């Protein structure tokens, strides 16, 4: 195994709302459309000295020798997908990129630079390209005019806030939202994945597994036996950078927070922060036989 540290630009291009595509069009059709989209993105990489490291579900990880080439490639990706409708279906992508030090092992890349690019991809909106302050500083004068600051972030591995920039890839920006530069908007950071524990069983929700189900049903990811729990009782889901518990049950879900407060969720959702406990269909004081503990794994949610 060869291992070395290089400075390069790391980029993720992710098909937006791929879950909705599968639900609306079916597995085979949606997969064909996503493959067509990723194929077009990978096909343009040689024009910008880029290289595809790997595809991961509905996204592709790429690297470039410098920040300029990565920004130009990202802009071309958005323009191409917007105009060509890969697979004869209107899809959109969101992109995050970062220029920095990367650990290269054989044909793969690792490290905080990769995690930063993945994080920005997660918070980017459809048809949006986000990058970092460190990347903006590396851009040529011509390309600096094509980016603008949009909000503050706390990137994994850094002890200081920095600025996230939007790459303006459209020639017509009449519908562009003005940024209030007096606002100190700080995006939610990468606080790590969420780990759920039921006795000796454990499930993790993160970039790779964005949702799990809990209930009495045999197809659930965590299976309980209490008859007060519904067959498909609750979903724990990652949405952008936050985790939510979404109740589908008859008796509701009880969430005990670090503050000591117990919240009853019935056919609704609740943001999960920090750590706590979840009981299905019964309050904690009713001595529910099955208590699900949740807590954050502080390692990066986006580690590759």
Image: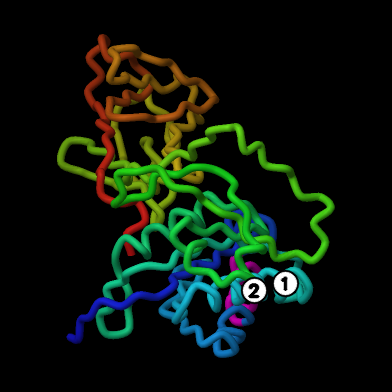
Which residue occupies the extreme top position in the image?
285
Work out whether residue 56 or residue 93 is closer to the camera in this orientation and state it: 93
Work out whether residue 89 or residue 144 is closer to the camera in this orientation and state it: 144
Q: Residue at x 50, y 20 (%)?
A: 266
Whether the magenta-drawn stretch holds residue 29 is answered as yes
Instruction: Return the mark for residue 128.
Output: none
Q: Quadrant of residue 159?
A: top left
Image coordinates for residue 258, horizontal then vertical, percent:
28, 20
User: Is residue 22 something one can see in this rendering?
Assistant: no
Residue 85 versus residue 266 in the image, above or below = below
Mark 1 surroundings: few (<14), some (14-19) or many (≥20) residues within 10 A: some
Viewport quadrant of the C terminus: bottom left
Whether the magenta-drawn stretch holds residue 137 is answered as no
Work out whether residue 151 or residue 234 is closer to the camera in this orientation and state it: 151
- Give the side of residue 145 with respect to residue 6, left or right: right
Q: Are marks 1 and 2 in contact (CB under 8 Å)?
A: yes
Work out whether residue 189 or residue 162 is closer to the camera in this orientation and state it: 162
Q: Residue at x 31, y 30 (%)?
A: 274
Tag 1 residue: 79
- Give the side of residue 144 with respect to residue 159, left or right: right
Image coordinates for residue 40, horizontal then vertical, percent:
64, 81
Viewport quadrant of the N terminus: bottom left
> Which range of residues does the magenta coloring cover?
27-39
The colour scheme applied to this rendered structure is rainbow
Q: Quadrant of residue 34?
A: bottom right
User: Is residue 243 something one can see in this rendering?
Assistant: yes
Residue 211 versus residue 14 in the image, above or below = above
Tag 2 residue: 77
Callout 2 secondary element:
helix
Image coordinates for residue 108, horizontal then vertical, percent:
32, 78
User: Is the magenta region chiefly helix, strand or loop?
Assistant: helix
Residue 29 versus residue 165 in the image, above or below = below
């Amino acid at each position: 195994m060869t291992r070395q540290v290089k400075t390069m630009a790391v980029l993720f291009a992710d098909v937006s709302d791929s879950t909705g595509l599968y639900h609306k069009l079916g597995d085979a059709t949606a997969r064909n459309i996503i493959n067509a989209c990723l194929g077009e993105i990978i096909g343009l990489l040689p024009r910008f000295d880029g290289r595809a490291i790997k595809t991961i579900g509905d996204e592709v990880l790429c690297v470039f020798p410098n920040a300029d080439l990565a920004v130009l490639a990202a802009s071309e990706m958005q323009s191409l997908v917007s105009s060509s409708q890969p697979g004869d279906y209107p899809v959109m992508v969101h992109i995050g990129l970062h220029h920095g030090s990367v650990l290269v092992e054989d044909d793969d890349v690792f490290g905080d630079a990769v995690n930063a690019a993945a994080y920005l991809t997660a918070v980017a909106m459809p048809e949006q390209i986000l990058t970092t302050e460190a990347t903006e500083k590396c851009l040529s004068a011509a390309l600096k005019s094509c980016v603008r600051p949009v909000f503050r972030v706390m990137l994994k591995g850094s002890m200081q806030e920095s600025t996230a920039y939007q790459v303006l890839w459209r020639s017509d920006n009449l519908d562009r939202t003005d940024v209030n530069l007096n606002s100190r908007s700080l995006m939610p950071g990468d606080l790590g994945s969420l780990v759920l524990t039921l006795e000796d069983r454990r499930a993790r929700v993160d970039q790779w597994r964005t949702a799990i189900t809990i209930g009495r049903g045999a197809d659930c990811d965590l299976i309980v036996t209490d008859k007060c729990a519904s067959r498909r009782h609750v979903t724990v889901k990652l949405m952008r950078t936050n985790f939510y518990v979404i109740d589908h049950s008859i008796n509701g879900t009880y969430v005990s927070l670090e503050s000591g407060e117990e919240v009853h969720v019935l056919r609704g959702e609740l943001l999960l922060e920090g750590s706590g406990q979840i009981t299905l269909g019964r309050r904690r004081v009713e001595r529910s036989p099955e208590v699900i503990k949740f807590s954050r794994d502080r390692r990066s949610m986006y580690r590759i």
